[in-house]
Image (cartoon, grey):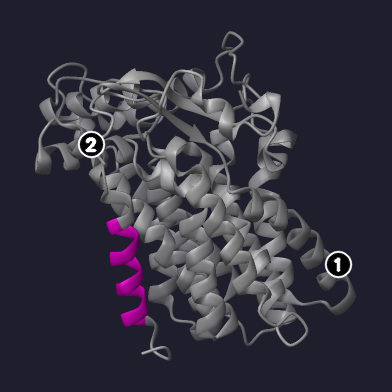
């Protein structure tokens, strides 16, 4: 079984799903940005008219699907997010398997992804970011497969997934350009990569398919009872979305600068108040062992690429660096730690690739890191899962720095 990825992938998906589903209905009220997206999902179910127009429709449509399956309940709001989180774990496993060809680093990647607090929290809340990341991670896994095995259908599938990611949040749009750049750079370095694909036809397919998939996600809007979308309004509507995305917002207590996110300077409390008969909290925070250890791994991958020209080191380091760097140029008036969510997952790849490269010298280092990450997950679990706390001041037990409060 350890030599066959599919049974392992199915097992990992089931394990992750079980973790995310436990006490999914707690709290029994809308949390953080659920106040925007659940009402928008209700509007999509009723096809009553446009709502929350600053974001595309797909993520909200998936929330609506969960509500159609399980009702307008906490489980209905959040169920599809659990599937997205489980899919992300499998995608990170698949990407690492394609890069290394070995089960151990792939399993370590899956475990680190699951133990990374940001995925746990985002997989249990009705927000758009988890859906976007699931499609992005799936696209990256498919691209890694295409690098090794080629085949136009894999490249088309990756293009579709990228378009669907953009259909959840525009933040995914730069990754279409990243995919094109990866194709051009890796193919020119070694023509044996992406076998069967020609560079410029593949770039054209990427652009055409991803844009088409993105535009198709607006299909429900053509059936609104009020202000239905029309083919003539589809492109102008994108400009309206852009205006909403770039509007200047008032200062916020939890705002933070993009460069501070990897350092864990300012996480976000999604919830901290009495609810469901007890004081409860949900803190969006990355697992410190993975976040801080990952920074060293990113640096190590960049050094390894400079010294040895390793394409896998370059790809892993460049993905994380670019995923963070886009926030230096995106025209957002405010920044928040949850924008770092994709980067907090992608940082797993430099860790596992570096540990795999040095596996003979660093015997057991991967298991040691997993042990530390697991201990931290258990330690922080009460304020990741909205567990009942003894009193309103209980949060101080987990506040390592004043900026976390």
Q: Which residue is mark 1?
A: 303
Instruction: State the predominant SS element of the stretch in magenta.
Output: helix
The N terminus appears in which quarter of the rendering?
Answer: bottom left
**Residue placed at 54% from the left, 83% from the top?**
148
Q: Earlier in the sequence, mark 2 or mark 1?
A: 2
**Residue placed at 63% from the left, 28% from the top?**
404
Coordinates of residue 263 in the picture (x, y in percent): 72, 40
**For numbered disc 1, what is the local secondary structure?**
helix
Is residue 119 found left or right of 44 in the rendered image? right
Instruction: Say if the magenta span includes residue 16.
Output: yes
Q: Which residue is mark 2?
A: 25
Instruction: Tell me if residue 64 can be seen.
Output: no
Q: Pointer 1: residues within 10 angstroms few (<14), some, or many (20+)?
A: some
Coordinates of residue 126 in the picture (x, y in percent): 32, 35
The image shows residue 37, relative to residue 154, as above or below, that is: above
Quadrant of res 387 = top left
Q: Give the label on residue 346, or none.
A: none
Instruction: Say if the magenta span includes residue 136.
Output: no
Is residue 4 found left or right of 242 in the rendered image? left
């Amino acid at each position: 079984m350890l030599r066959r990825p599919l049974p392992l992938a199915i097992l990992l998906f089931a394990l992750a799903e079980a973790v995310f589903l436990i006490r999914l209905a707690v709290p029994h009220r809308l949390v953080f940005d659920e106040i925007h997206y659940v009402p928008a999902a209700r509007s999509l179910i009723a096809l009553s008219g446009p709502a929350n127009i600053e974001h595309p429709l797909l993520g909200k449509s998936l929330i609506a699907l969960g509500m159609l399956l399980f009702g307008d309940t906490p489980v209905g709001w959040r169920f599809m997010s659990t599937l997205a989180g489980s899919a992300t774990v499998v995608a990170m496993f698949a990407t690492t398997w394609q890069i290394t060809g070995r089960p151990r680093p792939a399993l370590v990647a899956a475990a680190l992804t699951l133990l990374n607090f940001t995925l746990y929290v985002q997989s249990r809340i009705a927000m758009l970011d988890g859906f976007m990341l699931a499609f992005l991670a799936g696209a990256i896994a498919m691209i890694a497969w295409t690098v090794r095995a080629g085949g136009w259908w894999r490249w088309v599938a990756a293009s579709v997934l990228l378009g669907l990611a953009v259909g959840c949040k525009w933040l995914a749009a730069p990754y279409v350009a990243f995919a094109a750049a990866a194709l051009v750079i890796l193919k020119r370095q070694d023509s044996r990569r992406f076998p069967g694909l020609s560079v410029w036809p593949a770039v054209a397919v990427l652009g055409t398919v991803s844009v088409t998939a993105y535009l198709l996600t607006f299909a429900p809007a053509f059936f609104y009872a009020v202000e239905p979308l029309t083919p003539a309004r589809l492109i102008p509507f994108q400009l309206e979305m852009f205006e909403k995305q770039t509007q200047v917002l008032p200062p916020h207590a939890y705002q933070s600068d993009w460069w501070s996110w990897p350092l864990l300077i300012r996480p976000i409390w999604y919830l901290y108040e009495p609810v469901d008969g007890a004081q409860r909290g949900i803190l969006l925070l990355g697992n410190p062992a993975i976040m801080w250890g990952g920074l060293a791994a990113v640096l190590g991958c960049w050094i390894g690429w400079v010294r040895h020209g390793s394409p896998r080191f370059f790809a892993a380091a460049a993905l994380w660096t670019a995923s963070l760097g886009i926030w230096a140029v995106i025209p957002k008036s405010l920044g928040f730690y949850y924008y770092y969510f994709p980067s907090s997952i992608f940082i797993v790849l430099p860790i596992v690739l570096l540990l795999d490269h040095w596996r003979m010298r660093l015997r057991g280092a991967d298991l040691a890191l997993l042990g530390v990450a697991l201990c931290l997950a258990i330690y922080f679990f009460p304020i990741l899962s909205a567990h009942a706390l003894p009193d309103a001041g209980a949060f101080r037990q987990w506040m390592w720095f004043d900026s976390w409060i």
